[in-house]
Image (cartoon, helix red, strand yellow):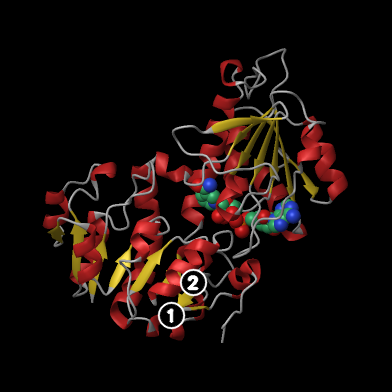
């Protein structure tokens, strides 16, 4: 198959769909790989590195899309890319369609087959292609919170870990999945006081074991959530209902009962956000203030550390990408886990949670 890798064009997105290491694997498996000139510059991979790995370098995104049977990206295609996709072409990337009706329409109109990283599943019920970026974003969320807590950023002026004789910050993590666990790990490492809320009792049990009593766990009922959020210095929004828009757990009304200068990091912003007052921000302008609280809602957090993120992402996507490249879309219809990633095919939405979130008909078979 002919596999294409365009340069990412979303603002401050420096990751790349295939690293030279991954290109070498595709080429070894007999595929032709086309990489846009400069596509790897954000991770320090030059065109020569890609050529050495066996890729053909092309100058423009138009050429990449035109020549490829499958386009491998990182972020969802931007409006200027929708028109470059065509019927029968496979798009393999993050999509996050549930809160994005415009992109969904763009993909449906193109006729392409769009396989979304974030809804591919594995045998253990996990989301193996979301997990590596969730690990990165979870860890980054605490760095972001630490920065936003500084007084000159509008925060409370607290050090996450405190110092001997002065209390550490209280960090409340909503959702104890991959993001939440990695956020908690960083926060605990810095000496913060950490509470994780989740709706899954088995997950709360696992977290209790993992952290060996170093974090508090609470069931995510409205009463508990309010009590924790009102005392928090930092709230990390890390919930997910796969494929669906995030539930709005922190309302605008709740903000007025929070501490002034408290920081809310909405990692779930890519699924629409789990705070009522969340609006996507970028790495250029990461935060804004609402009711005296600081919101951080960057939708592509891992894009800030593209070297770590691109390698972690490629490690995870490689077997699925190779399977699609070898068998075409048949790979997705044969494998239930890859099938779960099939979001749009021949102008129809095939992922039920996405269709439900958008209020359109699902054609899931
Ligand atoms: N902003 C970014 O750059 C970025 C990067 C990676 C991931 N994400 C997003 O972060 C979010 C979390 O991803 P993840 O990989 O950790 O998902 P996950 O599935 O591993 O974990 C989600 C957790 O949320 C819990 N949950 C669901 N409803 C809840 C509720 N009402 N209250 C409390 N907990 C609840 C689930 O039980 C689960 O444990 C997703 O929206 C994902 O897309 C964002």
> Residue 37 location, x and y as percent?
17, 52
User: Badge 2 local density, few (<14 within 10 Å), some, or many (20+)?
Assistant: many
Please state, as top left, top right, bottom left or bottom right, where the C terminus lies in the image: bottom right
Q: Secondary structure at mark 2?
A: loop
Please state, as top left, top right, bottom left or bottom right, where the N terminus lies in the image: bottom left
Q: Is residue 343 left or right of residue 4?
A: right
User: Badge 1 local density, few (<14 within 10 Å), some, or many (20+)?
Assistant: many
Cβ atoms under marks 1 and 2 closer than 8 Å: yes
Q: Is residue 141 above or below residue 66?
A: above
Identify residue for label 1. 332
Mark 1 / mark 2, whichever is N-terminal: 1
**Does the rendering let one see residue 178?**
no
Q: Residue at x 58, y 45 (%)?
A: 267
Q: Residue at x 60, y 50 (%)?
A: 268
> Residue 242 location, x and y as percent?
61, 64
* Residue closest to the far top: 165
> Residue 32 location, x and y as percent?
18, 71
Q: Is residue 150 above or below residue 308?
A: above
- Marking on residue 341: 2
């Amino acid at each position: 198959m002919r596999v294409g890798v365009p340069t990412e064009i979303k603002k401050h997105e420096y990751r790349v769909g295939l690293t030279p290491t991954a290109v070498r694997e595709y080429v070894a498996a007999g595929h032709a790989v086309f990489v846009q000139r400069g596509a790897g510059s954000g991770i320090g991979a030059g065109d020569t590195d890609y050529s050495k790995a066996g890729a053909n370098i092309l100058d423009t995104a138009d050429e990449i899309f035109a020549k490829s049977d499958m386009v491998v990206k990182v972020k969802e295609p931007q409006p200027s890319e929708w028109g470059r996709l065509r019927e029968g072409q496979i798009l393999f990337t993050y999509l996050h369609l549930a809160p994005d009706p415009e992109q969904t329409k763009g993909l449906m109109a193109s006729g392409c087959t769009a396989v979304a990283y974030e809804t591919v599943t594995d045998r253990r019920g996990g989301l193996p292609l979301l997990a590596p970026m969730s690990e990165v974003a979870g860890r980054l969320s605490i760095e972001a919170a630490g920065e936003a807590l500084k007084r000159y950023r509008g925060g409370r002026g607290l050090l996450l870990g405190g110092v001997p004789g002065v209390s550490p910050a209280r960090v409340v993590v909503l959702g104890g999945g991959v993001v939440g666990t990695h956020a908690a790990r960083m926060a605990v490492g810095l000496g913060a006081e950490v509470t994780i809320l989740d709706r899954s009792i088995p997950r709360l049990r696992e977290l209790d074991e993992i952290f060996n009593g170093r974090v508090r766990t609470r069931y995510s009922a409205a009463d508990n959530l309010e009590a924790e959020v009102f005392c928090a210095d930092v709230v990390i929004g890390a919930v997910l209902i796969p494929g669906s828009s995030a539930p709005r757990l922190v309302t605008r009304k709740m903000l007025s009962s929070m501490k002034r200068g408290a920081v809310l990091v909405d990692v779930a912003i890519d699924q629409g956000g789990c705070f009522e007052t969340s609006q996507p921000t970028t790495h250029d302008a990461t935060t804004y203030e609402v009711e005296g609280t600081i919101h951080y809602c960057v939708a592509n957090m891992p894009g800030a550390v593209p070297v770590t993120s691109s390698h972690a992402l490629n490690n995870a996507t490689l077997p699925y990408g190779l399977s699609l490249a070898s068998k075409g879309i048949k790979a997705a219809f044969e494998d239930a886990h890859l099938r779960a990633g099939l979001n749009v095919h021949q102008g129809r939405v095939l992922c039920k949670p996405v269709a439900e979130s958008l209020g359109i008909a699902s054609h899931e078979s």
